[in-house]
Amino acid sequence: MNRYFRGRALMIAGLFVCGAIVTASTAEAASAIATFNELFGKEVKRVKSTSEAADDIQLADQLITAAKSSDDRKDLQTVLLEQAYNLASTTPDGYDSAESAMRLLIEKVPAKQKVAEAKIVALYKRGYERSTGDAKKDAGEQYLSFLLNEADDKLKAKDYAGAMLLFQRARPISFAIRSDRKDEVLAKIEFYSVLAKSQQRIEIYQKRLEANPWDKTAHTALFDLYLVDMDDPAAAMKYSKIMGDEKKSKLVPLAAKNLEELTDAQALELAGWYEELAGPAIPPAKAPMLSRAKVYTAVFLEKHESDDIQKAAATLSLKRIDESLAKAPLPPASGEAYVPQVKGSAGKAIDVLAKINPERDKISGNWVREGKTVKVKRSEASRRFGDFGGRFGRFGRSNSLAQLRFPYEIKGDYNLQVKFVREDGDGTVAVAVPVGDSGVRVALDFAGDGKSGLSDLKGEDARRNESTVNLGLTNRRVYTLDVTVSVKDKDGEQNAKIIAKLDGKSFVKWEGKTSDLDRRDTRFSGNEIGVTTYNSGVALGAVKLRPLNGGEAKGLDGEAVKAPNLADVNSEEDLEKIIRDRLQGLNND
């Protein structure tokens, strides 16, 4: 950072601290623009007058840096980030900075989310439309990937109409560039268009209720749409009183309960009801309905103590449901079995942080336990000399690298959640995770460059591979990193899916061969999990590990936790053991 930009950023920080610039709320926008022009107006004119794009991007990056320290002035923060976008978006070299500005705007000023998201879409679209030759295909794949990732996020939120708009936008691009993902796009349009129509019907009936709150037909339609198409019994329950169906009014509150709260008779009645609902259901809703029927039947078999005709009938029902479920349509581009959204059906979560012994588990760095947190301080060499002191000279790289091994090994599928704060420094925070026979790091703010992703993937670190996204960290802010890993053997090779979220927002969605992954430059191996920090002081506030789909975790203290997996049922004895373990996990949680 040159002296001019450093001075301007410090000037802004100083103004916020001392409160020298304070205006009435009615004049906030005008004040923000005036402040921006005073601090950066001349520099903006200067860089716009040159033919070089590099100085525009450099100034945009400095505006983003200034915005990170301006939380007390949301009005000025907005102006800084919008101006950064305007400067950087004029050239493809600046697209990363432009997107970073809008991502930060969404984070800092949520009211600007729709505007910022539209600008990000425009950025990818512009990059694609202005490219030619081989560059156009690369830009198209990037644009396509962005659209599909955004659509997947909307699907998880059950915003099917919003997802369809993105899929429709992705379709012509996938054909124009002859993408390998074009079949995926078509399949998703076909599958989710039905749910989008259901969502439109919900909006129509809700408007009818606004005009007439006692419209029995609208109540009945909304109940059925939420219960079956949306697989949301809690939402359906709101419309159960007026429609006049005694059976539905009785059963829907039970469907909204946790599994352990049900009696055996209630579970059996719900199982029969959901199997009945699956018959006339739209194709995308058949698997959710049958999956609920299967889970409720399994709960009945676990809780029903007598070996009577009811238990024998339920066992036969389970086999019949399995046969129907095997024929039910599943979401496209997913080889995984459908996971029902039943409340309380997850297995036991392990409190890893409580079991960490810093003296025993540290690999490098000064890890200590302070109350309920486990911390590592930034080394003195890193503090005094920054990145230079950590990588070069007599201090050595290890002075800036801190690694902590968690006291558990994990096999198979699992979910890992780490709550942390980067207290000082500007380097990487990463978790090392096993993935089948291989492993990888999920790295945040790699080397302080504002890039995050998988490291290493196909020999490249998190700054320069297909998983790389523009995502940095803000010091002294609490983050929750959520990583889900699933592995399957296919055609003699291990294939994996890795989904990583930061504060609930997906930033890594990767599928591929485990052989493409590597935990280079770490001392984690095999099934070990842990955390790596570089040039940073970091505090861990929570670490939770949950095996999934038959995955198994083993602790140094001998504790072993295996996730229940209904797909493993080959006999009634298997089923009873799986459900018993599942219910035990629920009670322990």
Image: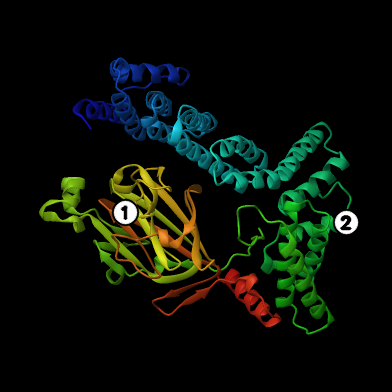
Q: Amino acid at mark 1?
A: Val
Query: In this figure, which residue is indicated by the disc labeled 1?
Result: 538
Q: Amino acid at mark 2?
A: Glu
Residue 45 drawn at (x, y percent): 31, 15
Which residue is more in the foreground, 202 or 91?
91
**Residue 323 shows up from this direction:** yes
Sort mark 2 into few (<14), some (14-19) or many (20+) by Cα contacts within 10 Å.
few
Which residue is more in the foreground, 21 or 46?
46
> Quarter holding the N terminus?
top left
Against 184, residue 497 (above or below) is below
Q: Residue at x 36, y 46 (%)?
A: 464
Which residue is more in the foreground, 124 or 371?
124
**Would residue 576 appear left or right of 113 to someone viewing this image?**
right
Residue 147 drawn at (x, y percent): 55, 39
> Quarter holding the C terminus?
bottom right
Q: Of helix, strand and loop, which one carries label 2?
A: helix
Against 55, residue 153 (above or below) is below
Query: In this figure, which residue is indicated by the disc labeled 2?
Result: 246
Q: Of helix, strand and loop, which one carries label 1?
A: strand
Q: Residue at x 43, y 80 (%)?
A: 558
